[in-house]
Image (spheres, grey):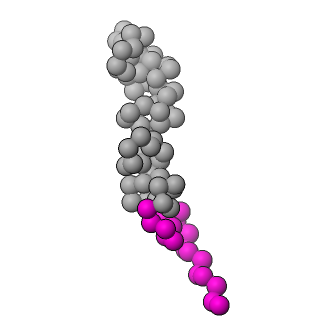
Amino acid sequence: MPNPSVSCKHEGCEKPSDGGKGYCARHYAAWKRGRLPKARYKSCRIEGCRKPVTGRGRCAEHFARDYPGKQAAATGETPTPAPAT
């Protein structure tokens, strides 16, 4: 529950924490979008990348780069077999 008598827990922000999770409305919205250092979801382990993880600690882009030819198992679908030539 928001507590407007306490200031936002984001460093350097003095606004009241009326947004949720101890943040002001602006920083709470940024947290929900994953734009704060402590994101709402687990973010990619590559430095500077804050996209959500799809497999092995990496986002889809970095997973494809580091593991070419493999697909992340997070989709839950069975992989389509390669056509026989």
Which of the 4 quarters of the picture holds residue 10?
top left
Instruction: Pick out the residue farthest to the bottom.
Output: 85
Q: Which residues are magenta?
A: 66-85
Q: Is residue 36 visible?
A: yes
- Could you say where residue 59 lies in the image, as x and y percent from the top left? 47, 52
- Could you say where residue 28 lies in the image, as x and y percent from the top left? 47, 25
Q: Is residue 42 visible?
A: no
- Could you say where residue 53 lies in the image, as x and y percent from the top left? 44, 52
Q: Is residue 70 left or right of residue 3?
A: right
Q: Residue at x 51, y 71 (%)?
A: 69
- Could you say where residue 47 lies in the image, as x and y percent from the top left? 38, 44
**In the figure, 71 relative to 26: above or below?**
below
Q: Residue at x 34, y 12 (%)?
A: 6
* Residue 76 within the segment the image draws in magenta: yes
- Look at the image and tell me in which quarter the N terminus lies: top left
**In the figure, 57 relative to 27: above or below?**
below
Q: Residue at x 39, y 48 (%)?
A: 46
Q: Please tell me how many numbered marks the rendered image carries.
A: 0
**In the figure, 11 relative to 5: above or below?**
below
Q: Residue at x 39, y 26 (%)?
A: 21
Magenta segment, principal secondary structure?
loop
**In the figure, 38 relative to 6: above or below?**
below
- Look at the image and tell me in which quarter the C terminus lies: bottom right
* Residue 51 within the segment the image draws in magenta: no
